[in-house]
Amino acid sequence: MINDILKIGILEFAASNKQNSMHAIEDIFTYACRADELNFSRFWLTEHHRASAVHPYNNPEILMTLIAGMTENIRIGSAGSLIGYYSPYSLAQNYKLLNNIYNNRIDFGLSKGRPENAHQHNFFNLNNSTFENTMYEKNLQAICELLHEEEKKYNESKIVLPPFKGIAPSLWYLSNSYRKKDLAIKNKLNICRSLMHGLDVFEYDEDLKGLQEYKEEYYQTNGQLPEVAIAIAVTFSKTKEQVEQEEKKYKNKREGLKIIPVNEYTFLEKLEKIQKAYGVNEVIICDTEKDIEAKLENLELIKELTTQQVLKTF
């Protein structure tokens, strides 16, 4: 049985069936506002620089600003910003100001990903257009210092990120592994473990104790616990037979995303297994549906199913 404190967040990949990118952006606004009305915990937008004439956006910062202004309670975030390609100063000041304008509702996901199109690397004003992990690590450290050591930076260098002594955004380590966990723990990053990437088909990763170890080491280092979440991708089907067909398709096809086929009868079962396996109290869901009306229906279904399950626990 699902724990009654399990929170559900939404991850938006901007996959749309619209042939007009502005219409696709309108759908994102509609989706985010409805998620807020239904009391989902988060609405995260990915950063993707796709070679598509109808792709609605690349960097989510501007959309985050607009969505935060349209919503009231839901946390809005990037999942995540390709920090190896941007100025740490620009990122830190933008996310901090945004967080203070919108009542501490901003999540800042730090990603070591890269633009899909190698030709785009030349337009990021880097001395070396080839992405290197060292740039990710260097920028991550700089961002965290700017946000966590505000008074020190001011006293040493007169650096101010307005508002001075304001609240820093919630920082998140987004990964499909724990290879950089020492760096993330040192810099007080919450963690969202992706089960959508890095596996040939969906399965539980071998290191099921990884999140627990992260929490324990984080507590030993920082004297408090981090926020922890699991990210999954799902596709909703109407019948058990359709779910079985989808499972066969995804089992025999290498996908960019590792997708879990579900329907209204199997969704809670999948969620319960994930929560039990990883010991988490929050799951971030990416619905791979491209039609906005169907996505809204799925959003309502997720809310209905999880609410009913919570009521059963009392």
Image (cartoon, rainbow, N blue to C red):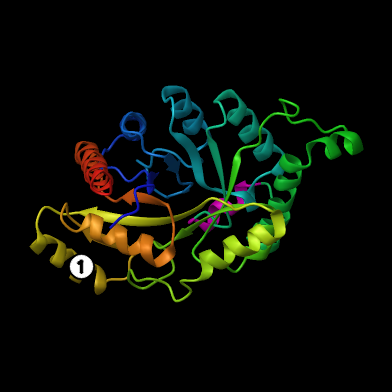
Q: Nearer the viewer, residue 110 or 224?
A: 224
- Above or below, comparing residue 169 to residue 278 in the picture: above
**Spot occupied by residue 168 in the image (x, y as percentages of width and height):** 66, 36
The verdict on residue 87 being magenta is no
Given residues 92 and 268, the one toward you in this image is: 268
Q: Residues within 10 Å of mark 1 (few under 14, many from 20)?
A: some
Most distant residue in the right direction: 156
Q: Secondary structure at mark 1?
A: helix
Q: Which residues are magenta?
A: 116-124
- Residue 240 is at least partly visible in this image: yes
Q: Residue at x 34, y 71 (%)?
A: 203
Residue drawn where x is 91% and y is 38% of the image: 156
Query: Does residue 227 appear left or right of residue 149 in this picture?
Result: left
Task: Give the answer, above or below, for where 240 lies relative to 141.
Answer: below
| x, y percent for residue 19 | 27, 38
Residue 246 percent location from the top left of the image: 18, 64
Q: Which residue is under mark 1?
A: 247
- Say which residue appears at 21% left-offset and 43% top-offset: 301
Amino acid under disc 1: Glu
Q: Is residue 127 left or right of residue 23?
A: right
Considering the whole magenta stretch, tell me its main secondary structure.
Answer: helix
